[in-house]
Image (tube, grey):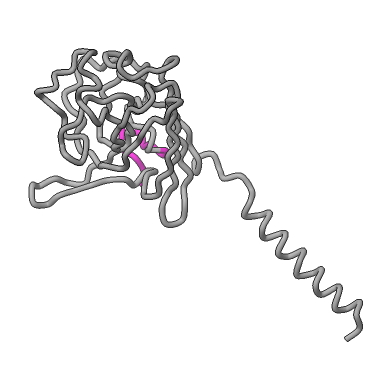
Amino acid sequence: MKPEFKLRGCLGWASLALAIYMSLAQPLAAEDKITFKLFPHPKFVACLQGAGTPQAQVTITRGTLNDTLIIQAQNLKPGLSFDMFTVQRSALLSDGTVDPNFTNFGLAWYQSDLHANSKGQINVGLRTIFLDQIFGFDPDVSLTPLNTFHVGFWFNDPKAAQACGFDITKPTPFNGEHKAGPVAMISVPDANTNLGPLCTDPNNDGTCNP
């Protein structure tokens, strides 16, 4: 084979590989990558904040087998530890204010520990099923499949929220020892569907299309 034919063959394969790479590198559709904020619980902001107003953002990219979640937070009190869960219900309304009719968080899944560094920042990545299909069930107690479309994190140490009025004699179960503090930051429901942000394809009847 002449050298020029070999060169053309190499260039052809190189062009094909580049085309495949570029096609895979194209931005995902909007519904396959979502970003939303978590809101601080108003009652515990003073025990949560560091240099400024606490902020937290969640970005989730849909995958073939599972999804990738990145949670980033800043302006937290340095050194605080938290426990992140996905839960069935939020304690806040769509505008970030406390829901006066809230009773409990419903079904909850323990997802990760979080820790604010010396600058009051958090940056943690997770991989599991998050978007549209996240659910749990337990036939032993007649618990039918329930979705956990909200993301939140709780004070790991109840004493960290004591100055804000949390009763440390009544810890919450939101850590590995089941002796956590109150919710620190959590997502809010959509004003129209009342569903959490992990549902990207809501139905008209208030359910989520899996």
* Residue 34 x/y as whole percent: 48, 37
Residue shown at 26% from the left, 25% from the top: 183
* Residue 41 x/y as whole percent: 30, 19
Judge whether 75 appears above or below 13 on screen: above
Would residue 178 appear left or right of 128 to someone viewing this image? left
Q: Is residue 179 magenta?
A: no
* Residue 115 x/y as whole percent: 36, 34
Q: Is residue 209 magenta?
A: yes
* Residue 197 x/y as whole percent: 38, 33
Judge whether 196 appears above or below 142 on screen: above
Residue shown at 20% from the left, 25% from the top: 158
Would residue 9 appear left or right of 158 to someone viewing this image? right
Count of numbered badges drawn on the protein:
0
Q: Which part of the image, by quadrant, shows the N terminus?
A: bottom right
Which quadrant of the view contains residue 130? top left
- Residue closest to the far bottom: 1
Would residue 187 appear left or right of 68 to someone viewing this image? left
Boundaries of the magenta span: 200-210
Q: Nearer the viewer, residue 101 or 203?
A: 101
Which quadrant of the view contains residue 168? top left
Residue shown at 8% from the left, 51% from the top: 140
Q: Nearer the viewer, residue 38 or 62?
A: 38
